[in-house]
Image (cartoon, rainbow, N blue to C red):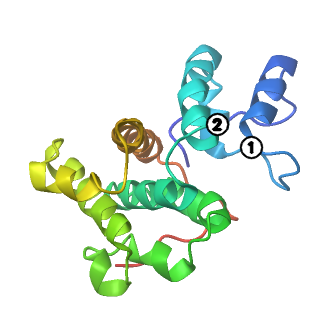
C-alpha cells in the first residue's frame, strides 16, 4: 500500500485534464499510480511535468539510449516500479529486447548481454554517477565520441531526474503497475 494514496476517479476536472496530458492517447489503463499520487500536490506535479515530458518527448538522445539510461538508473536505485513501467512501454517502443532490459538490472550488465560501445559507455557512466555522483575523465572520454555537448548535458540531467523519480517511487512504497514488466530477480 502506498504511503500516500493515489487519487481515484472520478477526478476533479482540472486533475482529469492534467492526468490526460501525462498519459499517451489511447492507453488502456488508468494514469500511473505515481502520477495520481503526485496530483495530491497539483502545483508540484505541474512543475515536474515540464522536465519529465521534455526529457521523454523532446530529448536529443536516441530513444534506445535514453531508455537504457533510465533502465539502469532505476535498476541501480532498486526502483522496480519505474523500471517496470519503462520496460513495458517506452523501452519496448525504442526497440530494446526484454533480454537487454533484464541485463540492465544485473550487477554486471556486460556479462548478460552484448552492448554496442556507446551503450556500454552509458551503462558505465550511470554506474559511476550512481556510486559517486561524479563522472571521471575516462568515463567522460568513453562517452565523447558518441554524443555532442547538448546530448551529454541531457544525459546528466536524465540520470539525476530518474534517480529522483526512483527515490520518490521507493519512498512512497508504490506497488508495481499490474501491466508493467516485473523487475528481474537477482
For this view, does 98 lie left or right of residue 156?
Answer: right
Label 2 crowd (10 A; few <14 / some 14-19 / many >=20) = some
Q: Secondary structure at mark 1?
A: loop
- The residue identified by callout 2 is 35
Residue 89, by quadrant, is bottom right
Instruction: Point out the residue furthest to the top here.
Output: 43
Q: Secondary structure at mark 2?
A: helix
Q: Nearer the viewer, residue 8 or 160?
A: 160
Q: Quadrant of the C terminus?
A: bottom left
- The residue identified by callout 1 is 31
Residue 39 x, y percent position in the rendering: 65, 26
Q: Nearer the viewer, residue 138 or 78?
A: 138
* Residue at horizontal 81 percent and vertical 53 percent from the top: 29
Rendered view: 104 above or below 144? below
* Residue at horizontal 63 percent and vertical 20 percent from the top: 46
Residue 33 x, y percent position in the rendering: 65, 44
Rendered view: 62 above or below 98? above
Q: Quick check: marks 1 and 2 in contact, CB under 8 Å?
A: yes
Label 1 crowd (10 A; few <14 / some 14-19 / many >=20) = some
Rendered view: 30 above or below 58? below
Q: CA distance from mark 1 to mark 2?
A: 7 Å
Q: Say the numbered circle drawn on residue 164.
A: none
* Residue at horizontal 78 percent and vertical 23 percent from the top: 15
For this view, does 143 lie left or right of residue 103?
Answer: left
For this view, does 63 lie left or right of residue 184?
Answer: right
Rendered view: 151 above or below 63? above
Q: Visible in this render: residue 83?
A: yes
Amino acid at each position: 500500500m502506498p504511503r500516500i494514496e493515489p487519487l481515484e476517479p472520478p477526478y476533479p476536472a482540472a486533475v482529469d485534464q492534467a492526468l490526460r496530458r501525462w498519459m499517451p492517447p489511447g492507453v488502456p489503463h488508468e494514469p500511473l499510480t505515481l502520477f495520481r499520487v503526485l496530483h495530491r500536490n497539483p502545483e508540484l506535479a505541474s512543475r515536474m511535468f515540464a522536465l519529465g515530458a521534455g526529457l521523454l518527448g523532446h530529448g536529443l538522445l536516441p530513444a534506445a539510449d535514453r531508455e537504457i539510461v533510465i533502465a539502469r538508473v532505476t535498476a541501480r536505485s532498486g526502483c522496480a516500479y519505474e523500471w517496470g513501467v519503462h520496460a513495458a512501454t517506452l523501452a519496448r517502443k525504442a526497440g530494446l529486447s526484454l533480454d537487454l532490459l533484464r541485463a540492465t538490472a544485473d550487477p554486471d550488465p556486460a556479462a548478460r548481454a552484448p552492448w554496442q560501445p556507446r551503450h556500454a559507455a552509458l551503462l558505465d557512466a550511470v554506474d559511476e554517477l550512481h556510486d559517486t555522483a561524479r563522472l571521471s575523465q575516462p568515463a567522460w572520454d568513453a562517452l565523447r565520441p558518441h554524443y555532442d555537448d547538448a546530448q551529454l548535458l541531457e544525459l546528466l540531467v536524465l540520470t539525476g531526474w530518474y534517480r529522483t523519480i526512483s527515490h520518490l517511487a521507493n519512498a512512497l512504497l508504490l506497488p508495481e503497475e499490474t501491466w508493467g514488466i516485473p523487475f528481474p530477480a537477482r
